[in-house]
Amino acid sequence: MSPEQSMQIYLTECKIHAKVLNQSLVDIQKHLPLSANIEIDKATLRILDQIAYRFAKLQYSMGEKVLSLILVLAQEPLAANATFVEKLNRLERIGAIPSAEEWKKLRVARNAIAHEYPDDPELRISAINRFMEGASQMSVLYQAVHEYIDAHFLLPKKPHKI
């Protein structure tokens, strides 16, 4: 399979995650910002769980698949032992991502939601509200990367069936 075909498959995967993430972000808006004084009901918790899941899936697919393949397609090779930060810096330099720092902030947002903080409702709600901001930024970043790919690479219209 060619790198272009692989990229099309990866983008299709990301598109699904981004679409569900975006819809969930719309659904949660009426509940934001969350407050420690208000108990989160089951329906809201399900939306938050869906956002966390799709955020993680989108970030993984982009980070492990799409961003690495951009460097291949752009003929911007890095050493096999290059760190992810080096990849991010190269991607920023070629304009594939707006900011390497932004990606790092998204990782911090994801990590913040991983902690439950059962004894500190204020801290828990603060982490969730920060994560919601990160989830919105993840969606914006996905769109920017997709636009970069569309502008710089000729991809097949349909994913290759295996």
Image (spheres, rainbow, N blue to C red):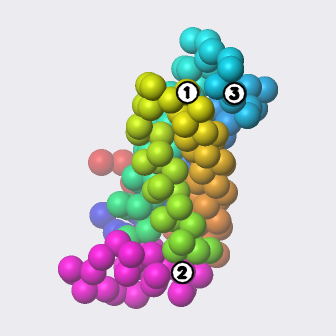
For the view shown, which residue lies furthest in the right direction? Answer: 30
Give the vertical position of 38 relative to 70 (above or below): above
* Residue 152 % position (x, y): 58, 79
How packed mark 1 is, by other alpha carbons closer than 10 Å (few <14, some 14-19, many 20 or more), is some
Nearer to us: label 2 or label 3: 3
| Mark 3, secondary structure of its residue | loop
Residue 134 visible in image: yes
Left or right of 15? Residue 7 is left
N-terminal-most mark, 2 or 3? 3
In this view, the residue farthest toward the top is 42
Residue on which the image places disc 2: 92
Residue labelled with disc 1: 121
* Quadrant location, the N terminus: bottom left
Residue position marked by numbered label 3 in the rendering: 35
Question: Which mark sits nearer the N-terminus, 3 or 1?
Answer: 3
Q: State yes or no: residue 90 in magenta.
A: yes
Residue 120 vs residue 50, the one in the foreground: 120
| Magenta region, residue range | 69-96
